Amino acid sequence: MAKSTEHFSCQSCGASYRKWQGKCDSCSEWNSIVEDGGKQIVPKGLSSGKGRQLEFTTLDAEKSDYKRHFCGVNELDRVLGGGFVPGSSILIGGDPGIGKSTILLQAVGLMAKRGYTCTYISGEEATQQISMRAKRLGLTDSPVQLAAANSLRDIVTSLEKSAPPDLLIIDSIQTMYADNLDSAPGTVSQVRACSQELIRLAKKLNCALMLVGHVTKDGQIAGPRVLEHMVDTVLYFEGDRGHQFRILRAVKNRFGATDEIGVFEMTDMGLQEVANPSALFISNQEKDISGASVFAGMEGTRPLLVEIQGLVAPSQQATPRRAVVGWDSSRLAMILAVLDARCGLSLAGNEVYLNVAGGLRVNEPAADLAVAAALVSSISDIPVPEKSIIFGEIGLSGEIRAVGQTDARLKEAAKLGFEAAIIPLGSKIKDPTIKIIEVEHLSEIVSLFTREKEAVNA
Ligand code: TYD
Ligand code: MG
């Protein structure tokens, strides 16, 4: 076996190097290479027969039959795939002040009231500050074990000595430090070491662990990317600070579906669950507003109606502005190009603004058609047909492609009082509850607006 002498490795992708360098050749990350300690990546003599014999079981082993704990915040339980799995670790990330500490305090508060042992360890706030918040949330009578601590050693010692909790919250992982490492709290090596130790402890005590993670300015969870691999579940708590709505999104879940969302509203009594989010994201539409369409989207398994607003205005500038809130700007550029090339509708001399109402972020290509309708409606100053929803993906030749879960989208629309739906031709509908208008090409959407105008002028 060739003897390996590399002893530097990239913290971001794991590539090994013989000497330090500023940029990793394999993942192009800067400043991610650190000395790795051991001179040999694979120590010699592993096959000497000194290891312990593993016991193999089958997939239906009884051990896999775990019982989940419900915390009582229903939206959180649902995003987790039906409550907390004992021994699992969950990472929750989000912008500062978005409400991570609040939702976790509410979760432990409700859970402890129902007889579970819950421990909340904060490295950011003093216990008095947390009690003040608990008072506002009406949770002071809940028997939560609360502590303010930063030292990993203190936390591990205390937890190993007392009865293990059912749920352990660490707020936040960036404020914890292991005193056997030289680096400051929040650095890659500290975050990795602390998480590893806490995850090991959670497995040993069979308690659910919830770590709060800070995010960097581009929205990723700060610290090593490996953190997301180490935990079982990664949740993001997002929302616009200017709006009250907060969305909890699972991006990784070993024990449930991802892309599931929970919707909350931030009030002066903490975070309230929103039972009917669709009603929230559609403004009280006055009749006959041009430049707005209602998109029937899907967030995980749940249909969600949102209003998409477009504005096309003449521009004096050489490069007119295109501004997008809540949607992908390259997707908008594509739709503008298709409108130009396939439908002869050029917006080159115009500024284009696009906004998804309510602070929601839409990622589905199915929103293409709703975006196009909002823009064309803004140009022609003709409103989208009243009480209608719209969805469909636009292809580069201008064709409208069918999207999944048509029935769920239509059902949600019918539930909220919509009477018509503009959808791709060839969608498989089982039971149409509302009037269906099928479209095959983007030019039909364009002519939908021009034809009406002629009828009005006539
Ligand atoms: P917090 O949970 O401290 O955010 P994070 O831990 O993600 O940094 O949330 C703080 C924000 O929430 C703060 O701006 C005030 C607001 N808030 C309310 O509006 N109502 C409440 O009842 C509470 C507790 C907080
Ligand atoms: Mg906090």
Image (cartoon, rainbow, N blue to C red):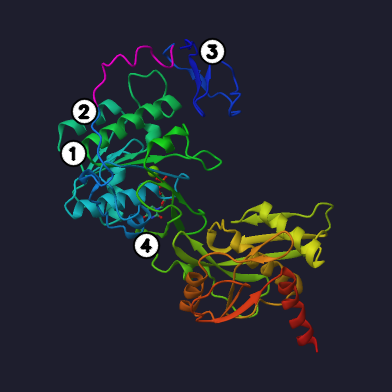
Q: Is residue 48 magenta?
A: yes
Task: Indicate the quadrant where residue 448 lies.
Answer: bottom right
| Residue hosting label 3 | 18
Q: Nearer the viewer, mark 4 or mark 1?
A: 1
* Residue 256 numbered mark, or none: none
Residue drawn at (50%, 66%), measured in percent from left and top?
405
Residue type for callout 3: Arg
Per the model, the C-alpha gap separating discs 4 and 1 is: 30 Å
Query: Dot 3: within a 10 Å radius of its alpha carbon, few (fewer than 14), some, or many (20 or more) residues?
Result: few
The residue carrying mark 1 is 164
Q: Which badge, 2 or 4, comes first in the chain's sequence? A: 2
Q: Is residue 328 above or below residue 283?
A: above
Labels 1, 2: front one: 1
Q: Residues within 10 Å of mark 1 (few under 14, many from 20)?
A: some
Q: Amino acid at mark 4?
A: Glu
Q: Are marks 4 and 1 in contact (CB under 8 Å)?
A: no
- For label 4, the residue is 273
Q: Position of residue 381 (x, y in %)?
A: 73, 75
Identify whether 371 is placed above or below 204. below
Query: In terms of secondary structure, where does tag 1 sit?
Result: loop
Viewer-side residue, 57 vs 111: 57
Tell me how far mark 3 sits from mark 2, CA to CA: 38 Å
Separation of residues labelled 3 and 1 (CA atoms): 44 Å
In terms of sequence position, does the residue under pointer 4 or pointer 1 come before the other?
1
Principal SS element in the magenta part?
Answer: loop
Q: Which residue is mark 2?
A: 157
Q: Earlier in the sequence, mark 3 or mark 1?
A: 3
Q: Amino acid at mark 1?
A: Pro
Q: Secondary structure at mark 2?
A: helix
Which range is magenta?
Answer: 40-53
